[in-house]
Image (cartoon, rainbow, N blue to C red):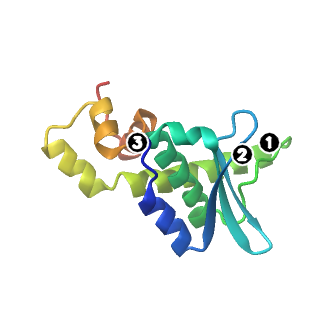
Amino acid sequence: MVIIPQVLINQAAYEGIHVMFSKLEGRILAYYAVDAGQAFIVLSESLKKDTAILRCVLAEELGHHYTSVGIGVPVTHTLYRDRNKLTQDEHRAKRWAAEYLLPLDKLLRAFRKGIRHLWELAEYFRVTEEMIRFRLKMLKVGMAS
């Protein structure tokens, strides 16, 4: 059973962002967009199958709102500078998501409880192992799998 991340949905609502599920084409899981002053996060229906991925993707899309407002609709970039900016925007959004989902004080509390392996941390925080790796890399901490 997937648990819809209500805290993240509430955070989006507080910011005036409409969150909706839709059938998205290809490998796109979600996007953030602003149209006529209204912000939207569109999530793939496929995300309803996995709470951890849903939490990570939704948090990253919220990260776009906080770190690069108005950017987020999937676009094909041909110029290097455009691809580079997109990469930087994605990194900022993911960084925001990692800090939001895995605050340092809660990570330290998990370590003190003896939760040390990537999979254990992922289960504990209900996120993906990839998000755990990203957050630990931000902190420059190595982990065993």
Q: Are marks 3 and 2 in contact (CB under 8 Å)?
A: no
Between circles 3 and 2, the one closer to the viewer is: 3
From the viewer's perspective, is residue 30 above or below residue 11?
above
- The disc at residue 84 is 2
Please give the residue where the numbered disc 3 appears in the rendered image.
127
- The disc at residue 33 is none
Amino acid type at circle 2 is: Asn
In-image side of 97 versus 38 (left or right)? left
Please give the residue where the numbered disc 1 appears in the rendered image.
80
For the point 48% across and 53% down, which residue is it?
97
For the point 71% across and 55% down, which residue is it?
72
Instruction: Return the residue nearer the eye: 55 or 87.
Output: 55
Q: Position of residue 117 (x, y in %)?
A: 26, 30
Q: Position of residue 102 (x, y in %)?
A: 35, 51
SS category of the residue bearing label 3:
loop
For the point 49% across and 40% down, which residue is it?
53
